[in-house]
Every structure is written in C-alpha cells, then in structure tokens.
Amino acid sequence: YDGVDIAFKHALSSIQFKVQLSADYSSTFKLTSIKVGQVKYSGTFTENITEEFDEVDGKKTLKSSENNPSWSVADNQILNTTPYVAFSSTDGLVLNNNYKDGTTDNYLTLDGVDGQNDLILMPQELPSEAELVIEYMVNDKKESSTVKLSDLKIKEWEMGKRYTYNITLGYDLILVGATVEKWEENGINTPIS
C-alpha cells in the first residue's frame, strides 16, 4: 500500500518560556517557578466534519466543511484557581551564567530543563485576570512578580500556535515579551492495512 498523507494539526495552544538576566549580576539569581493562572480551562471543540453518502458507489466519505475546526468558550466561565505550573524547582535554577558579552539577548530556553513543562492549554481570548506568576530567589531571598497577560501584546491564544514568553529578570525590573509561531507538524505517510 502507498499510504495516505495525513496533515496533523493541533487543536490546542502550546505555551513555552525563556528566561534571562537584565545584567551581569555578581549575586546569584535562581528561578524557582513559573505559573499561569486565571485562564479558561474548558470549552466545546467542534471538528466541523460532515459525512456524505455517494449514491453511485454506495460509500460514505467524511468531508471537512468550509468552517475550520473551532472552540466555543462561555464568556462567563469560571477561571482556573489552581495555576498551571510551567516550571518548578525546589533548589532553584541558577541564572547568573547566561549573560554574555554585554548583551541581554541570551535567553535560557526552559525546554528540556528539569522541572519544566510545556503548557498545552485551550485556545482563548485571554481574560483580563489572566496572569503569569514568576517566583525566584536573589541571594537566597524569595521574590515573586505577577504579570497580567492581558497587558502584553498577545491578547489571544489561537489553536495550533506555539507562544514563547521571554522573561527578563533584574533587581528592579521584570520584563515579559512574547512571540508566536505555527505549531504544526509535516504530513505523515501512514500505511493502511
């Protein structure tokens, strides 16, 4: 059999994080957690696929409608009260070694770092309450900062997209920016038996 090409598309949104320091501090920064809270967590997914019957050959086929698959989410939905944990480390991840050559474009990608999880969340327009909670230690003193996600440039998580939040930590500042890209995989050739 030659197989059938299947183009896989993700129905959810992927959320990832990168972290850097704003300067070459002699003290040690340690990242202890990154959490996302106050977002919507349930909805109804509709594939928008119809079944058609061919009277000539007597076969049924599935056809994708003109409408793309979609999510519907109630506007008044209760938001998650237990934050989604994107990163957690009891000892803390040392951040003092990723600043190089006087630049501040040396983000440590948390993908693959022990304690890190990609968040796979429901696509949604971000509620005004949606927040990013960053916990860290400076000279072993616990610190915490909360950033309202709705204050950032990206106001919505779309289906099949990967969002990377770039976090810059410093003594007197926390900066968060975000980038987005398609979260799709190439078609796969799947044999049919």
Image (spheres, rainbow, N blue to C red):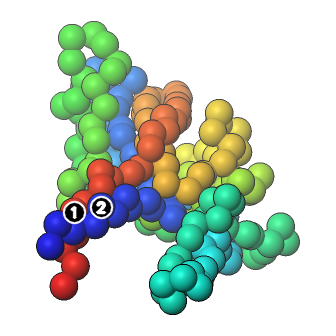
Q: Quadrant of the C terminus?
A: bottom left
Locate residue 42 relative to residue 75 in the image: left or right. left
Residue type for callout 2: Asp
Name the residue located 60 percent from the left edge and 51 percent from the top edge.
157
Distance of mark 1 from mark 2, alpha carbons?
5 Å
The residue under label 2 is: 5
Quarter of the image holding residue 2? bottom left
Q: Residue furthest bottom?
A: 58
- Total labels: the figure holds 2
Name the residue located 39 percent from the left edge and 51 percent from the top edge.
184
* Contact between labelled residues 2 and 1, with CB atoms less than 8 Å apart: yes
Element type at mark 1: strand
| Mark 1: few/some/many CA within 10 Å (<14, 14-19, 20+) | few
Residue closest to the eye, 62 or 130: 62
Q: Residue furthest front?
A: 56
Name the residue located 22 percent from the left edge and 30 percent from the top edge.
98
